[in-house]
Image (cartoon, grey):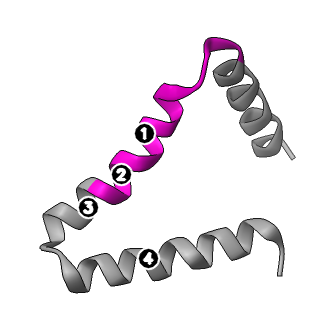
Amino acid sequence: MSKNAKIAAGGVAVGLLLLIWLPWWAALLIVLGVPAAAYVALDPAQRRRLRRATRKELGR
């Protein structure tokens, strides 16, 4: 299993646990808010590098 697949599987597991413990809207805020906060925390050069890598992968 690749590293990205392990991360995705862990994210799904955490999301399911959050849905059990919290109301659905709170779990949704956490699931969407954490990646958004991480993206905002990047400096502009890191954001450009991330966008460029994503576009290259889509073109394959």
Quadrant containing the N terminus in the rendered view: bottom right
Q: Is residue 34 above or below residue 20?
A: above
Q: CA distance from mark 2 to mark 3?
A: 6 Å
Q: Is residue 53 magenta?
A: no
* Residue type at the position of mark 2: Leu
Residue 40 in percent (x, y) is at: 47, 27
Check contact, mark 1 vs mark 3: CB within 8 A. no
The residue under the point 48% across, 77% down is 12
* Residue type at the position of mark 1: Ala
Of callouts 1 and 4, which one flags the residue occurring earlier in the amino acid sequence?
4
Q: Is residue 60 left or right of residue 5?
A: right
Tell me the quarter of the picture where residue 30 sits: bottom left
Q: Is residue 25 above or below residue 45?
A: below
Q: Nearer the viewer, mark 4 or mark 2?
A: 4
> Which residue is most to the right?
60
The residue under the point 62% across, 13% down is 44
- Near mark 3 (Cα within 10 A), the count class, few <14, some 14-19 or many ≥20, is some
- Near mark 1 (Cα within 10 A), the count class, few <14, some 14-19 or many ≥20, is few
Of callouts 4 and 2, which one flags the residue occurring earlier in the amino acid sequence?
4
- Near mark 2 (Cα within 10 A), the count class, few <14, some 14-19 or many ≥20, is few
Residue at which label 1 appears:
36
Q: CA distance from mark 4 to mark 2?
A: 13 Å
Residue at which label 3 appears:
28
Residue 28 in percent (x, y) is at: 26, 61
For the record, the magenta segment spans: 30-45
Q: CA distance from mark 1 to mark 4?
A: 17 Å
* Residue type at the position of mark 4: Val
Check contact, mark 2 vs mark 3: CB within 8 A. yes
Q: Nearer the viewer, mark 3 or mark 4?
A: 4
As drawn, the label of residue 14 is 4
